[in-house]
Image (spheres, grey):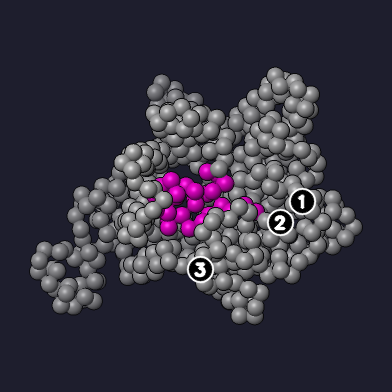
Amino acid sequence: MLFNSNAFIFLFLPVVLGGFFLLARLGHLLAAAWLTAASLFFYGWWNPLFVALLAASIVFNFLFGMSIGRAAAAAARRRAKTLLIVALTVNLLLLAYFKYANFFLAGINQLSGAGWSFGEIILPLGISFFTFTQIAFLADVYFGKVREYNFVHYSLFVTYFPHLIAGPVLHHAEMMPQFARHETYRFSFENAAVGVTIFAIGLFKKVMLADPMGVYARPVFDAASSGVTLTAIEAWGGALAYTFQLYFDFSGYSDMAIGLSRLFGVVLPLNFHSPYKAVNIIEFWRRWHMTLSRFLRDYLYVPLGGNRKGPARRYVNLMITMVLGGLWHGAGWTFVLWGALHGAYLAINHGWQMLRARLGHNLKISSAAGRAAGCLLTFIAVVLAWVVFRAGDMTAALVMLKAMAGCNGLVLPDFWLPKWGAFGQWLAAHGVVFGNTRDLVSGGLVNWIWILLLVIWFAPNTQQFLSAFRPALILPADVPSGRFKWSPAPVFALIAAALITLSIFNLHRQSEFLYFQF
């Protein structure tokens, strides 16, 4: 079931929300069980068969978690470690089968000439998210960070529908105290107002910004996959369209998840914080998919040694972490290369900062011009990596990148020539080529690009807009900035209603969230 669907907005959400607070009057555990059952129904809407897989995963990890906890409490560290390794292995094997089995077999077949195959494997929605969530739970139990073992609350922690399909990746310690609070089970007008507002903003981003940009991006990448020779304008137009599509699609989902959860009195961790405002790639990964970055840091990068074993080992650890992070997004060489690109970006960034520190530069002080230059450079690097991420295969990625580098020349759309008048004639007389761009570039796309650039770089984000009402857990230090603040006033209620109404009237062109495929 999609958040951006009539069935969800007008049927599922009102029934689940009403049932939750009505049952809470009879008992908090009953209300939590209701929300768990509703979350399983939400998950099963796509394919009921995979509900059994999710339920089995929950039971398995809960039982192993309790066993690890008992062994650790009894100072039987060896047994606890053995149980942890077994549980992690089972989780990773399950994920590997569904997500990577045929990918690895294809590589083996290419090298050996064999024709092995597991047949068609349907990827269960959200398997990466609920697997990583439970891996974090098992690790936290082993290290003594988990104290509560309530099966209903644990099941809700894993299945909780606002985060189940596309994140955020949750920590047990963040959610369990909230499920135990009495205030969570009492309806709050403030929570309702904040939740509806955040949901409205997210829905608008998805329906009115992300989906239209997908219409511009798809033909360009399809053309690259078909071997069409693209011009620089066409390739950059498609790359920027996808850059904005993914941005507002994921930002929209993150807002909608936070808003929906707030309706139930539960605050989710922040997962998206204006990443295109980052002045370097290190900051980008502190702002993009923040809970996944946290997971990779805490459960992969740090155990590998982090930065504790010298610069060379740090760069190796960064590369391993980012390549595996790329592979987490999908079973394909384009995802591996995307991860490797970001690993290289991070290594270069850390090396540059180390060099500056040795030269005596104060890394905490930078000029406005320096920050602007860093932001632009980071944005371009991210766009180039997104091309690899989005391309159907390595060949298509190379086609796009060659065109963006100007290898196929710069051809401006011919319909710009009469619009530009004397200036256009002057450009044509001085060698600028105007020609047919096969409808891959339009005036509408150009307008979208400059408008959305202004939005992502200068407009306050959702967290800044609602900063006075704690919209998410662990807000960054820069969130309280900005003058334009939300309050529970009629004018903001009208704005939220307008955003929702406009989005609902455009739900006929609904599409899945991009992160559903990861």
Q: Mark 1 near mark 3, Cβ–Cβ under 8 Å?
A: no
- Residue 266 is marked as 2
Q: Is residue 393 visible?
A: no
Disc with the residue nearer the chain's start (1 vs 3): 1
Q: Check the picture and name the quadrant holding the N terminus.
A: bottom right
Between 435 and 376, the one nearer to me in the picture? 376
Whether residue 278 is in magenta: the answer is yes
Label 2 element class: loop
Q: Mark 2 near mark 1, Cβ–Cβ under 8 Å?
A: yes
Q: Which residue is mark 1?
A: 179
Magenta residues (range): 268-293
Q: Give the CA separation, mark 2 to mark 1.
A: 8 Å
User: Which quadrant of the structure image shows residue 82?
Assistant: top right
The residue lying furthest to the top in this view is 78
Q: Classify 33 as above or below 482.
A: above
Residue 487, how many percent across, how many down? 63, 73
Q: Residue at x 75, y 30 (%)?
A: 69
Q: Residue at x 43, y 56 (%)?
A: 276
Disc 2 residue type?
Val
- Mark 3 packing: few (<14 Cα in 10 Å), some, or many (20+)? few
- Residue 348 is marked as none
Q: Classify 308 as above or below 176.
A: above
Label 1 element class: helix
Q: Give the CA separation, mark 3 to mark 2.
A: 25 Å
Q: Is residue 351 visible?
A: yes
Q: In the visual, does 145 lie left or right of 343?
A: right
Residue 256, how many percent across, how many down? 61, 60
Q: Which residue is mark 3?
A: 482
Q: In the visual, does 45 lie left or right of 26?
A: left
Disc 3 residue type?
Gly
- Mark 1 packing: few (<14 Cα in 10 Å), some, or many (20+)? many
